[in-house]
Image (cartoon, helix red, strand yellow):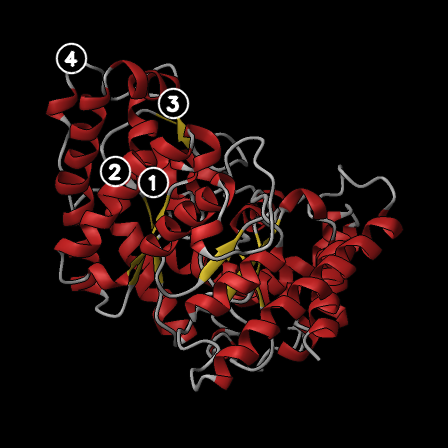
Amino acid sequence: MANGSVMTWEQVTGPKGHEALRGFLDGVAQASEMLLSVIDAANAGEYDQHYAGNPDAGVLVTTSCHLMVLTVLNRLKGVNAAGFYKDDPLRYVRLNCLIQRMLGVERLTLGWPVYGFGAEVLGQTMIYTEAQAPGSDPGVPLLDLDNWRDMPAYDPDHPIAHIVRENLTHMARLSGIEPVAHLPAPYSLAAEIFGQEHLIGALTERPEFVSEFLDLIATRVLKPWCDDLVATVPDVWLELSDASGSPMFIGPENFLKYSVAPVAAMIADNPWGGRIFVANYRGDLPAGAKTRGRRKRSTATTSDMSFEKLLAAKTLCCPYFLTRLEADAAPAEKYTEAAIELNLPLYLGMGAVRLDRNSNPDVALAKDDVFASAKHRARQIMQVSNALVGEGKPRATLSWPGDLYIEDTNAETHLDLFQAVLDGVRAGAR
């Protein structure tokens, strides 16, 4: 590089860069100065050529780290949340890629405040704090039972629409892989602009309204938004995030009726429907259900049938891989058997709280636990991989996401525990 004081890429992604990031999170002044120089170099494009590539060997870890990047920019440069997420999409993409590489993540992804952006593009009143992701103002919902039919249509000229398009364009160029657009699924977007509690109440009191409301969101907002994104980035993948519509929050029957139905219709009714997936539904068993080994359908218990029914709904909304998140109750082994049966790659989540510095007073003990868990999950992933290869199907044919997903990485993530995940995955994938 022209400037000899700039850290080389090998230094940035090696122990020196890792220690700079660790020291910054721990409040070490010298480390902050070093990290600031790395950030400036990244913003100048010094490391752009190193973000491309999509390794496909072994079991790979991936994560969304935009909250950590927000903290870095806020502390080092005074950039607040609104400025971080909105002012400079190229900076946003570059620094998300940079921090992932500094953490040791080989397979890059790009996240943003999906629920907040979905609500804001429709005109919802938002709350932007100094250094937290934005969210809808719960005291000022955009819509109610009197005006919901007047819901605004998606506007491709809205600033948020521009930001999402630019994020995807820059990510595609820098990473060289097919980018993933993060949009809220119908139920979760409804919860943002109508209010979580009001929508849950309507599930019981006004079910016909909920169905019509979700259909309207799908046709008036999400369909034209997807049309716009596919026209801009033809190889984009469309991830509809739906945490609020998960079985563990609204119950299995409501999940099947209200969350899955509009997503399934979007998949079936649109030319880009095959590029839609929902991978973050949480909760795989009814409350109190006990897991059992897989049985033939004719002898399955009610709990087994409930798991299979929910699993079928999940795979309908995500037909390319099978996901088990930390909040799911059934053991990883049950998902391993199901993935082999369904001939799908297995994708496992690692909960953020397990890596949180505030939740683990004994870091040494937590490291052992996280390492063992990551190793076990990597072995489950490899078991599925070997079965798929034996059937003549590649373990993964997509350029995303990863095999083990750390469900959130932020400034409170303990880097020793993050590293324990990486080490455990390597050990389990041997």
Write down the residue under mark 3: 196
Residue under the point 42% across and 66% down: 342
Q: Secondary structure at mark 1?
A: helix
Seen from the viewer's position, the closer of residues 166 and 1 is 166
Q: Tag 2, which secondary structure?
A: loop
Residue at x 25%, y 51% (from the top left corner): 162
Cα separation, mark 1 vs mark 2, equals 6 Å
Name the N-terminal-most of marks 4 and 2: 2
**Structural crowding at the residue carrying mark 2, measured as other residues with C-alpha within 10 Å and reported as few (<14), some (14–19) or many (≥20):** some
Specify the label residue 146 is tagged with: 4
Amino acid carrying mark 4 in the image: Asp
Residue type marked 3 = Gln
Q: Nearer the viewer, mark 4 or mark 2?
A: 4
The image quarter in which residue 10 lies:
bottom right
243 left or right, relative to 154:
right
| Mark 4 vs 3: CB contact within 8 A | no
Q: Residues within 10 Å of mark 1 (few under 14, many from 20)?
A: many
